[in-house]
Image (cartoon, grey):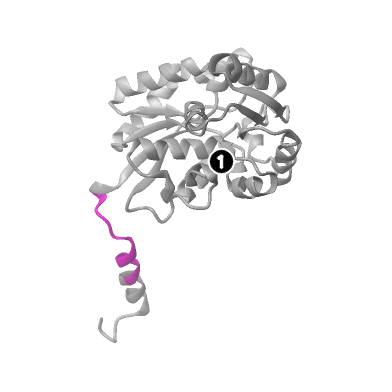
């Protein structure tokens, strides 16, 4: 480099050497995000930060503002919005699509499976959801008993627990929720509140804590919660990243600092 070139050129050249890779080799994961969710996109991108030579996250949104069992809230999860949002991700030629949302917990795991099938039929791209990823993580780690932590109303929590128990054979030991329905408010739940709920449920032994809601900022706390309470945390956003990495052929173990799920311990 010429001595007359500004320092910014040196920074640029050094930075490019660190970040250059063949774009054709990078896997692209498409995340379907609830419209009022402000938690999942920053943390998903952070989890794969520095792995740009392997994988990148991309996002498309569908309208979700309220979580309840009322008709208008349930209609947010009709099939058509999923297909429209998935089509935009298909424009980016992503390698996998995930509904990074937990609605299957109360609309039904079978409904989630149907949505995935329809997305793949429409786009040719394999698909999953946060709740299906959660089930796979449980199976792979031989989970039989679990605690639940959510921001939801009791009626929603009861449906999720019923599905875990009756559809899948998992025993829900303890459950804590915050009785909230406004999706935007979930992202305002404090780390102290999340810690408090995990502390309350973990008084009894179980194979894991299932934190259900991708608009909770619990993903950032996983390692601390696991250290404090000696139990594996299955956070709904983290399991979605874990599953989609597997779908695109990237070893989840390359993700460091986000809990036991990624270390296999």
Element class at badge 1: loop
Towards the viewer: 242 or 42: 242
User: Is 181 covered by the magenta stretch?
Assistant: no
- Residue tagged by mark 1? 38
At horizontal 66% and vertical 32% (from top left) the residue drawn is 206
Image position of 20 (left or right of 100):
left
- Figure quadrant of residue 172: top right
- Number of labels in the image equals 1
- Figure quadrant of residue 197: top right
Towards the viewer: 245 or 61: 245
Q: Residue furthest bottom?
A: 3
Say if 172 sits above or below 233 in the image. above
Magenta highlight: main SS: helix
User: Is 22 covered by the magenta stretch?
Assistant: yes
Percent position of residue 5, x then y? 30, 81
Percent position of residue 245, x then y? 39, 40
Q: Is residue 91 visible?
A: yes
Quadrant location of the N terminus? Answer: bottom left
Over which residues does the magenta segment extend? 14-23
Say if 215 sits above or below 262 in the image. above
Percent position of residue 166, x then y? 58, 14
At horizontal 36% and vertical 18% (from top left) the residue drawn is 118
At horizontal 47% and vertical 29% (from top left) the residue drawn is 136
- Figure quadrant of residue 114: top left
- Mark 1, other Cα within 10 Å: few <14 / some 14–19 / many ≥20: many
Image position of 5 (left or right of 114):
left
Q: Is residue 217 visible?
A: no
Percent position of residue 9, x then y? 32, 74
């Amino acid at each position: 480099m010429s001595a007359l070139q500004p320092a910014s050129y040196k920074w640029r050249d050094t930075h490019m050497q660190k970040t250059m890779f063949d774009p054709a080799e990078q896997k692209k994961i498409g995340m379907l995000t609830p419209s009022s969710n402000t938690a999942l996109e920053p943390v998903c991108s952070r989890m794969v930060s520095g792995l740009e030579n392997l994988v990148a996250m991309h996002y498309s949104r569908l309208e979700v503002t309220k979580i309840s069992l009322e008709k208008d809230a349930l209609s947010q999860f009709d099939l058509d919005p999923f297909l429209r949002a998935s089509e935009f991700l298909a424009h980016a030629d992503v390698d996998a699509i995930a509904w990074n949302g937990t609605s299957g917990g109360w609309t039904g795991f079978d409904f989630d499976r149907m949505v995935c099938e329809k997305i793949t039929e429409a786009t040719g791209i394999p698909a999953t959801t946060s709740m299906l990823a959660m089930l796979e993580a449980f199976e792979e780690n031989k989970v039989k008993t679990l605690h639940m932590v959510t921001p939801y109303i009791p009626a929603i929590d009861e449906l999720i627990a019923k599905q875990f128990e009756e559809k899948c054979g998992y025993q829900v030991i303890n459950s804590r929720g915050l009785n909230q329905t406004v999706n935007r408010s979930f992202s305002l739940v404090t780390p102290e509140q999340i810690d408090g709920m995990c502390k309350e449920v973990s008084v009894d032994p179980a194979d894991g804590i299932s934190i259900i809601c991708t608009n909770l900022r619990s993903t950032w706390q996983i390692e601390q919660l696991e250290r404090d309470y000696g139990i594996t945390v299955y956070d709904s956003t983290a399991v979605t990243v874990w599953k989609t990495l597997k779908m695109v052929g990237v070893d989840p173990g390359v993700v460091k600092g986000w809990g036991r799920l990624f270390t296999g311990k």
